[in-house]
Amino acid sequence: MEQLVLGIGTRLQHTQYGPGVIVGLRYATYLISFINHGIKEIDKNDEKLEEIIPENLSEEIETHSEIEKSLLKILRLWNGVSEVVPLGDRWKGGTMVLQPGDASLKPKDLPIEVFFHKIVMLRDRLRVLEQQVNAHKVLTDEDKVNLQQYITRIYGTLTTFNVLFKNKEDWFTGEKSSE
């Protein structure tokens, strides 16, 4: 196939990886987010790559903000790209002290920002795991539900750390009570 010169957001089909969307451009390659294989760097001359041209092309107006939201959603789902999650103001510049039960041992000081970053990374990786479980082709629906329940319980266990988050919408949530 001739070298494709396409832009970000172009839908493609790859014979090995299936459908995908261009999320990045490099000199000789595209960064493509594939539905079942995550982000792959593919040569622009790859013979297995072809542009998907919709049969029923209709003019739909999308704003840059809608396109940006769509791309960010794809990146979060398949690349594990983490969003910027703000730490609560009262914790900024703070230190977490881990004090051993044995008074002869030294405590460990850790900047709260470092600990918070690890918590956010954990949350993002759990989200990617959740998406991979849901999209898995071999697992049965029952297996997916069982694994999803474990992931929900993990989120519930992590609610202790919600106090660190600035915004409530970033909090961990576990199972909701049915009351």
Image (cartoon, grey):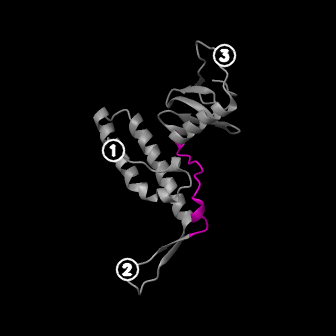
Distance, label 2 to label 3, CA atoms, is 67 Å
Q: Which residue is mark 2?
A: 101
Mark toward the start of the polypeptide (2 vs 3): 3
Magenta residues (range): 78-94
Residue 97 vertical placement versus 171 (above, below): below
Q: Dot 1, crowdedness within 10 Å: few (<14), some or many (≥20)?
A: few
Disc 3 on helix, strand or loop? loop
Closest to the camera, between mark 2 and mark 3, is 2
Q: Main secondary structure of the magenta part?
A: loop
Q: Dot 2, crowdedness within 10 Å: few (<14), some or many (≥20)?
A: few
Q: Position of residue 47 (x, y in %)?
A: 59, 27
Q: Position of residue 169 (x, y in %)?
A: 52, 46
Q: Which mark is residue 177?
A: 1
Asked whether residue 161 is in view, the answer is: yes
Distance, label 3 to label 1, CA atoms, is 45 Å
Q: Nearer the viewer, residue 157 or 67?
A: 157
Judged left or right of residue 112, residue 157 is left
Q: Which residue is mark 3?
A: 59
Residue at horizontal 71 percent and vertical 39 percent from the top: 27
- Amino acid carrying label 3: it is Glu
- Amino acid carrying label 1: it is Ser
